[in-house]
Amino acid sequence: MSDPTLLVLSSLAGGDKHGYAMMQDIEAFAGTRLGPGTLYGAITRLERRGWIRPVGAHDRRQQYTITSAGRAWLADQLDSLQQVVKTSRARLKHA
């Protein structure tokens, strides 16, 4: 899994975080390390789409939260992924 949008939203679904905390969380749950350029590019795109928003600085680091629109998009994507996983597992049994 390497889609920065999905990874950032999944991280923020667990609570508000600043960029470095997101990088650590994503590496822990997905085994993927997003570089700063990739992470902050994704944050900028997600803010523009209204899927995340800043919630204030903590220790001079900007924290972000997932919005209801971001939660809805993430839920839709996870439903789609679940269908792909279900289909793939069934096909593997017959391979």
Image (cartoon, rainbow, N blue to C red):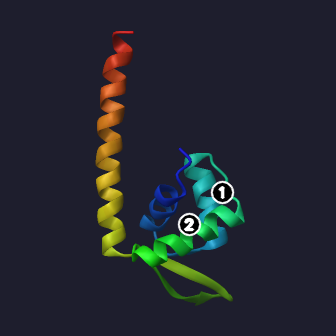
Q: With 16 as the anchor, is 27 left or right in this view? A: right
Furthest toward the top, the residue is 95
Q: Secondary structure at mark 1?
A: loop
User: Is 3 rendered above or below residue 42?
Assistant: above
Where is residue 94 shown, x and y percent of the image?
34, 9
The quadrant holding residue 50 is bottom left
The percent position of residue 14, horizontal first and vertical second, equals 45, 65
Q: Amino acid at mark 2?
A: Ala
Total tally of numbered discs in the picture:
2
Quadrant of the image containing the C terminus:
top left
Image point (59%, 60%), residue name? 25
Depth order, front residue of 31/36: 36
Pointer 2 or 1: first along the chain: 1
Q: Position of residue 12 (x, y in %)?
A: 47, 68
Relative to 58, say whether 32 is above or below. above
Residue 38: name its quadrant.
bottom right
Identify the amino acid type marked 1.
Leu
Which residue is at a point 34% across and 49% down the rendered structure image? Answer: 78
For residue 19, which numbered disc appears in the image?
none
Which residue has dot 1 on it? 34
Q: Residues within 10 Å of mark 1 (few under 14, many from 20)?
A: many
Foreground of the two, 81 or 22 = 81
Disc 2 marks which residue? 42
Question: Which residue occupies 54% across, 57% down?
Answer: 4
Marks 2 & 1, CB-CB < 8 Å contact: yes
Query: What whole-number distance in Å separates the C-alpha atoms at marks 2 and 1?
Result: 10 Å
Q: Secondary structure at mark 2?
A: helix
